[in-house]
Each structure stands twice: as structure tokens, then as C-alpha cells.
Image (cartoon, rainbow, N blue to C red):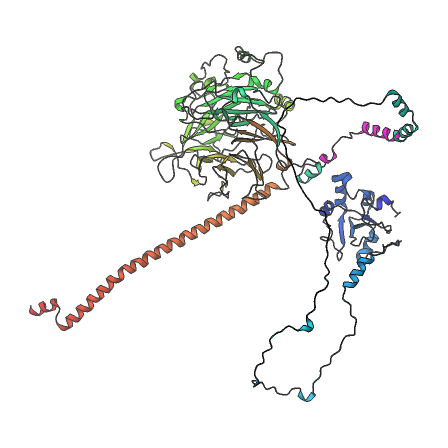
Amino acid sequence: MPRKSKSARSSAGSKGKDKGHPDDIVPMLLTSATQELFGCRADEDVTGESPYKLLKKDDIIQDFKTRAAVSDFRPVKQIVLDYPEDELLLVFDKDFIYGQRFYLVVTPEAKERILNVVQPPEPETPEVIETPEPSLSSEQEIDEESVKETREKLCYKFSRVRRKFGAPVVFSDSITTLVNCPSYPDSKFSIKLMQRDCGSQAAARLRSSSAQTQWMMLRNMSTQYTPRELSSEEKEKILQSDSMKNFCKLVTPRMLQALQEESIMNVFFDDWKALGTAVEDIVWSGEDFKDLRFYRGFSDQNYTKDKKISSINWHPTIYGVIAVALTEKRQEQEPTTFASKDSLILFYSFSDIYNAQLLLECPGDIFAFEFCPSDPNIIVGGCKNGQVVLWDISAYVTHLQGTQPDEEVSVNTEIYYINEERENKPPVVPFCAVSFIDSSHKAAITDVHWLPPTFEVTKTGLPVENKYNISAQIVTCSPDCALMFWDVRVPDRKQNVYQKTPYGVPNTFKHLYRTWKPLFRVSLPKIDTSGEYAPLKFSLERSTCTANTARTTEAANENDDSSKVIPDYSQLRVPSAKTLTTLEDVNTKLFIGTESGEIIYTDWKLVKDESGRLHTAKPLHCFSIHHWLVNTVQLSPFFTDIVLTIGSWSFAIWNEGVMDGPIIKSPNFEHWCTVGCWSLSRPAIFFIGKENGSIEVWNLLENTNVPAQVLAQVTDAKITCIKPWIASSKQHFLAVTDELGMLKVFELPKALCVPSWNESLRVLKVFEVQEERLKDLVRCRELWAKEQKEAEELKKRTEHDVLLKPLREEEEHKMLEESIMKGLGLWPATADKQDA
């Protein structure tokens, strides 16, 4: 094989002077990342005693494709491609014989020769390396401190008379007295230390000082700068100079080459980002940041003054649109009080951070609301007075998207602007339907969810097939000790279809106007005592609609018209129960958090009693985990049986298949936990908001007792809501609200967005370990209870025997006395018998 050029044989940054090497090897400089990738870490995988490592040819070719120009094997790319065998030999050059830490054997004959010979090949044309003269001072000091032998060694010979070998030995006590040999100082060995050798190093003293002054006097000042330019004569002289002409001749070819490259390819393309999006590539991309990045802040003082945000939701399909529900800070009003002008749901957009884009009129303060999974224009909310409200914002989609057409959108749209200035005030959308107050909850609705479109429930809570495959049923809960199921479709009763709605209100849910009643009610009786539980939050399997992966406005406009058909709820009717098929694989059990801190696990299906009447069965389990209000009960977006609950000063993670208690229980924190949520992209990450305005980031793969990161002072007040959102694969947001009515949107770093390698399986392993720990703890508790019960029974028997012992002794004493008296004839019964 011909000798390679010097650029192919050596790499930049070689250690020491390059030495000659045979034609069948090439010195290589391998970075630590390449050594770890190919399993050839210096002094770990390969050592001086075992310096050989066989590399697969396919792995090196894959490295060319993956890392391209940054691959350490790029200088020998053609050699590797032409190599006839499947494995190449890499040798660890510990002594830098050929100038690098490694060298690659490029011929099969050399590989066989090196593997069969222990010693490495001798260099072909070794160069004479001139070693610098040693420092006389340092070598002399080392020579003086070394120990050298200056006299001959003494030789001692020990012998014994032969006749004494094998003679018997007799041991006896010595008759001589013991002689005490006390220690005393000997003047012959007392040497006075006259000189001592010690090392010292001189260093400059480091001093750090600072001063801070405040300029108290304010003064308005301005400074204007005038650039100093050359005159025309000076410019002409410089342009006509020989140095300028020589410079232009020198750089003209390089400039022309740069212009040609720019026209051929994009020189501003980021090659690092094109390598990948894994967590390992974060450092390469130059965008490694750990803290949240503030992206937008929203606050409309016309509506948020003296208000706090109780609920928040991102719009499922429109980029950068987020809705918040406002409530009064002081809960002094009665639950039945209406405040239609003050109770609103505001829509914000990234395009305008100071003004609300849309207002939803509410009959009372809204504590929870949610977009419909099948139609994002339909919104359901729960009021403070216990009523359920529906809105239809389909006429305002273009307004939220920021594209206002010239023609009118609908007749109703123009009606809302009659009494308002369209330019300054956002449009107000009235509610389409509200539940009948006598059939609604008796307290504020604290949580509301749509049932997934995969099934629906009957009046008895039995899950059946959903022929329309559209979400049309709602579940609500309230502290009035009940869960209610609602249906938004047209009922079988024809008189309800032709209800008249007020002027200007969309006719989407006219069949529900003033007649909407729940499908059925689920009560929560206590397990051991009388009374009922007061639910605040519950978990329900969420459906995957277009909301979970948000799209840009352009993508939404392109896909919505063709790929998705928005249902018309005014035409949907409740099907007959006789034509529906019962579904057996639907999970009808759910977790519920109460205002007393309990976690309830119950079934919503109704059962019949002895008389045949339907009623709610008692909950299956009840755990007193949290000390006070439960503010979060959320199902993991990656696992269908993992639930996160947060309340008061702790959080807990539950597995629906293990109902002996939480598999993970946190210690009590210093600050009150107000809200929490799972990450939408990483199975091991979840967020917890605190009352002091901070956010804790927990990573189950790192630690289950200490947060992985604490983001302090995210807001200036108590955090009320947290909602993540995935805008794209490279842009993840986290919306945070507080009780001051402020909405802040943060951009999440890549470390919190991009999952690590095989993260889901690793998190499952963590859950399995915690489940086994919980089962062991339950077994230990049962064993302790059994031992304690046996100890109590033993104690009772012992106490009983102690009490009976005096009675037995007294009876024995009486029997002995009776026998003695009878023997003497003095027992009264015996005397009477003799007289008779």
C-alpha cells in the first residue's frame, strides 16, 4: 500500500513530535466521546498490557454517516472503505511511539503479525530525538536525597555443635531476681537539630473588595457623538497606495471562492442541530440551559384587577392562544349570587400580550373549564353556583387566528358589536346553554372533564359503544358530595328540541336551554362511618385529540378543511339504549381527592339494592394521605394506571393495580403545594407549584425525595395553575398563573423536553421497585399486627392466671381443712350424720 500523506497519518493536536511509522499503520487521535462510543477508553478498556481492540468496519462506516465531518476516522475514510476484512485492529500506543495515543492497522497481514507477536512493531525509520539537558539543580538535589550504600555489607555466620542437635530440652524457673531496666536519656544520641530542609512556594496575596454607591440626585442629560471621518484626499491616497493594491490582489481569490460557496450552499446552516435531538446532543448545539426562559406575560388590567386565575387551558388547535378563568379573590358572595358582568373567561394570544382577544360571558365565577376533544370550539365550564355552562366560539375562530376577512363571518357575530366599539374592546360571547339550577350541584363545581369519544355511559353508568365517535358527555364534581354525568346531545323528548334561545345566542345547544339535567348522579358515602366524602378533583382517562400536539395557524388551515369534520351538536341525538353494545374493557373506576385530604378509589357504575333500586356503592378504598385540600389528581399521559395527587404539603404517586397505598410518598415540605402537573414529553418529569411563587421540577429517575431543580421566584404571588403545552418538537411551553391575575408563559429547556434514552422503561422499573417496597411494607405491617395481637392475647391469659391463682390456693386450703376435720371427726356434716 502506498504511503499516506502527512495529513492522513497525523491529526491536529498530536502529543509530542511525530515519529516515522510503517506504511501499514496510521496514528489516530481519538476524542473521549469516540473512545466511549467504540469501547476503547484509554487505561480502562485498553491498557499497556492489553492494548488491542478490534473495531467492526460497519460501526466505523456508521460513524461516518452519523457524525460526518466531526468523526475522528474521517482522515482514513477511504482506507476503511477499501479494507477487505470485517474487523480492523486498533492498538493503544501508551508510550506515544508513533506520536498519538492510538494507531490503526490498515492491512490484514499487519493485523495478523501484530496479534501473533507480543511486542509492538519497531518504527521503520526512527528519528533521533534530542532530549533536553536535565536541570543540574533538580538532578543534584534528587541525587543528594537518595540513599546509597557506602560500605560493604557485614556477613554473620551462626553455628552449633553437632552433638547438641536433638538433645532433650529442660525448662525450669530462674532463681535469679528480675532486674528492672528503666529508660534514661543517653547523651551520646542527643543530636541538636541545626538545619532543616523544607519546601516553600511564593504566591501573590489575593484580595477581593467591592464598593456600592447610589446616585441620589437625578439629572436629565444627553450626549451626542460625531464620528470622525477621513477627508476625501486622505481616502483617495489610501485607495491608490501600493499596500491597498497588494491587499486586494491577495484577498480577491478568497473572496470569489467565498461568494461561490455561498451561492452553492447555505453557509449559515446549523450543522450541529442536524446531528440529532437527543439529550446527548444538547451540549453540542450550544443551547444548553437549565432554567425556564420567560417568553410572554399577559395581563389585561380592564378585567384582571382584584381577580385571581382559577383555571387555565391552551387552545387545542390555534398556536399561541390560551384561555384563563377569573374569580373573585374574596369569597364573600353566596354560592347562588350571580355576577355576569364580573365573571369572565379571557382569551390571550401571543400576538398581543396586553389586551384580551375574546371574552366568554359566565353566569358566575368559573373554577374549572375544558375544551371539547372532538370540537375545540365547544367549551364547558363549572360555575360557583353549581351550574354547568356551554359556549360555542366557532364564529370567532378567524378572530383568534388573527386573520380578519372582509366579509361577515355570521349573523350573530355582528350582533355582539352593536353596543361596543369593535376596535378597542374584544368581542363578548354569551353562553349557549346552562343547566337547570334545581338539578345542578349545590356547591361550586371544582373539576370538569369530557368523557373520551371511545365510549359513552347509560343512565346507570354502564359503558357502551359510541357510534358517533364524538365526545358528548361530561363529568363534574363538587364539594356537595356528588359526581354528575351530563349529556349535551338532543334527548328523545321532542318538546325540548324546539326551545327558543335569546336573541344573539347561537342555536348549537338550544335543546338544552333551561332544561338541561344530569344523566345520573354518583354519591360518595363513607366506608366506615356515616356521612359522605366531599370531592374536589378526580382523574379521568383523557382522549387524544388534535389538542395534544398543537399546530401552527397555517397547518391548521391546511388540514382542518379536509382531514377533520367538525360535528354539529345540534343534530346529534341520544341513541336508544337497546341498540348499543356494552363494553367490558372500559375502566369505570377513578381516583378522587377530597377537601379533607383523602384519596378515594371508587366505581361510578350504579348497583341495585335488595328492593331493586339503583344506588351508588361505597368506595373501594380510602387513604388519608394529604393533611388538607387535594388540589391535583392527574393521570399520567404515558401510563394509564399511574396517578399523581398533590395536596397541602406533600405529593403521592399511585398505581391503580396496587391499592395498598401510594407507591411513592414525598416528605412534608416547608411551603404549601398549590398545584402540579405531569410533563407532556418526559415520563419521569412533573412540576409542582408552591405558595411562595416557586416551581419544583421532580425527576423520578434521579431522586424521589428531593426535587431535581427548584425554580425560585417564578411569580410574585401564590401559584394557582400550571399547564404545559407542546407547540412543536423544538418548542415546549409552560403556562403559570397566580392569584394576582397574572399569566406568564415560559419556554422549557431541552433538558426538560427531550426524553432520555429508553426513559419510559426506566420509569417503569422505578415504579416496579417502589411497588415491591410497598408490598414488603404491607407484609411487615401484617406480621407486626399479628405479633402484637398474639402478645396481647398472651398478656390477657397471663393476667387471668394471676387472678385465678389466689382462688385456687383458697379452695385447696379449704379442701385440706375439710379432710383433716373429717379425720378427727370434728366436721359438722359428719357429726350430724353419726347422730342420725
- Name the residue rendered at 24%, 63% in the picture: 808
Q: Is residue 273 magenta?
A: yes
Q: Is residue 117 visible?
A: no
Outermost residue, top direction?
418
Between 172 and 206, the one lying in front of the other is: 206
Above or below 394: residue 147: below
Outermost residue, bottom direction?
163
Residue 365 coordinates in the image, percent (x, y): 46, 23
Residue 48 coordinates in the image, percent (x, y): 76, 56
Residue 535 coordinates in the image, percent (x, y): 43, 33
Between 572 and 246, the one lying in front of the other is: 246
Between 612 and 710, the one lying in front of the other is: 710
Position of 225 compared to 709: left or right?
Answer: right
* Quadrant location of the C terminus in the rendered image: bottom left
- Name the residue rendered at 65%, 32% in the picture: 730
Outermost residue, left direction?
836
Q: Is residue 211 magenta?
A: no
Outermost residue, right direction?
242
Q: Is residue 756 visible?
A: yes
Boundaries of the magenta span: 252-277
Position of 510 compared to 147: left or right?
Answer: left
Residue 528 coordinates in the image, percent (x, y): 37, 40
Q: Main secondary structure of the magenta part?
A: helix
In terms of image quadrants, where is residue 214?
A: top right
